[in-house]
Amino acid sequence: MSDDMYQLIAIILYMAAMLLIGYYAFRKTTNLTDYMLGGRSLGPAVTALSAGASDMSGWLLMGLPGAIYLSGLVEAWIAVGLTIGAYLNWLFVAPRLRVYTQVSNESITIPSFLENRLKDKSGLLRIASGIIILIFFTFYVSSGMVAGGVFFESSFGLEYHTGLLIVSAIVVAYTLFGGFLAVSYTDFIQGLIMFLALILVPTFGIFLTGGLAETAASIREVDPQLLNFVSGATFIGVLSAVAWGLGYFGQPHIIVRFMAIKSVSETKSARRIGIGWMILSLLGAIATALVGIAYFQQNAGAVLVDKEAIFIALGQVIFHPFIAGIMLAAVLAAIMSTISSQLIVTSSALVEDLYKAVIKTDASDKRYVFLGRLAVLLVSVVAAFLAWGDHDTILKLVSFAWAGFGASFGPIILLSLYWRKITAKGALWGMLVGAITVIVWGNFEQFTGKFYTKMPEFVQFATSNLYEIVPGFLLCLIVTVVVSKMTYKHNAEIEKEFTDTVKILKRDQ
């Protein structure tokens, strides 16, 4: 049997397992809360790993190792920022959001929580939130489908569109039928596969390159600066990399996991599991790149065509083809886990936050679940259409979308959980300013055209080098606070819910 056949068998077994989990979740899904939030029944391990797997995507196994392979440890600053941001998110957002979403009219989506929390009677806040989620996540899902198509193209020589359709069909199938439970259970399995793969590849790879000392020596032969955290770094560059951590507070597909955990007391265990998984996985990704540098330095005849494929290349060198196929499945797991999480959140935005808010009909849960599944299918078709043609521009939108969510929702979520006096108008204006700032800052040269070169050098430098989440997050925070202070009026119901949330947290944590 050929090596490709062994690897293909491993991939087929993995995909079959994902479909079986989807069927199991389908049997357990009976109402809209089950479909959108898993009936708030997730345990700490499933919550932690599903949040991690949906967060990291193919960046963890391909993007980060590829960047470090090319530029060295200076590219690890983004991992530092993400780890700090994820920890603070688990510490400050997870327990409060779990309690507050239940206290505030059993909210099952982020937009519905903001509307219920701030008692917005106009519906504008919920609708604006839903539209932001719908737009950004459609492109996010599309970029994942692109990654899936490229994966099959580079790993098995399949035509790009064939690979895209295979990945799309499998993810859509288990997400459409199994809903949030299927997404969470599959993400848990995918998180385990990613974790084990990232530990095993560099561990066995070090034996291949002669041990730690020999590996480090080989890296220094290539370039001593590859092991330097600050070589080539600038203040704005490091700030922009670390600022990725700000995005966590506003990522709907991540913080929705906090709303679904079984109880607030389990958020502490989930935090320990999630951060432990994240730190070890990131260290594994970094170590994979460093071992890869040493291996290809020691084996001059070996050629690495795609630097982002260093994880896959090492897996194929180190392991039996079937095990190497499982390593490939880990890459696919990273891609699929993110697509499925984004699909279910986009579906909830369409049904719970746009359809129900605008149409205002009292339909049965069965009908809403059907509409949720229809929304998954609709978004998938649009995303696949966007991924079908010129996909390079879509892939570039991933960091843009992360900044968009972080700047639009991050400050609003934090203030709604910790500040009694935030208002619906403050949140709406802050959200819009955050989103617009990210759009303008990220495309400043295109917006200003010929006037760009006439602007002061520090303006050109800042807009070209500073990650747009930094100005977007700060302006959203400032505008929300200022407008809220101008429009605040005492509301007994808001005060009671805030007080009840604090009491429950003190009792149950």
Image (spheres, rainbow, N blue to C red):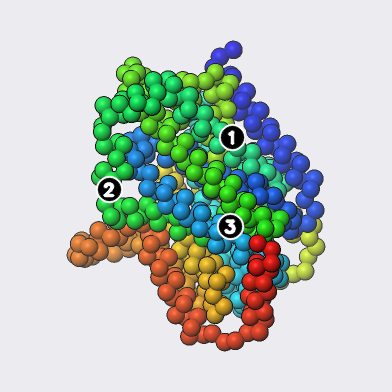
* Residue at 47% in and 36% down: 284
Residue 374 seen in this snapshot: no
How much space separates mark 2 and mark 3, taking CA atoms?
Answer: 31 Å
**Disc 1 residue crowd, few under 14, some 14–19, many 20+, Cα 10 Å:** some
The residue closer to the viewer here, 333 or 394, is: 333
Residue 503 point in image, percent of width and height: 67, 72
Using the image as rendered, state which of residue 16 and residue 381 is in the foreground. 16
The x, y position of residue 462, in whole percent, is 28, 60
Question: What is the number of the mark on residue 233?
Answer: 2
Tell me which amino acid carries mark 3: Ile
Q: Residue at x 70, y 37 (%)?
A: 19
Specify the amino acid type for callout 1.
Ile
Tell which of 261 and 383 is nearer to you: 261
CA distance for labels 1 and 3:
22 Å
Amino acid bearing label 2:
Ala
Query: Gap in Å between the C-alphas at discs 2 and 1?
Result: 33 Å
Whether residue 287 sits left or right of residue 347 in the image: it is left
Q: Which type of secondary structure does the marked residue at label 1 adopt?
A: helix
Q: Is residue 182 left or right of residue 428?
A: right
Question: Quick one: label 2 or label 3, which is nearer the N terminus?
Answer: 2
The residue depicted at 67 percent of the width and 60 percent of the height is 264
One can see residue 55 in this view: yes
Q: Name the residue carrying label 3.
A: 255
User: Residue tagged by mark 1?
Assistant: 193
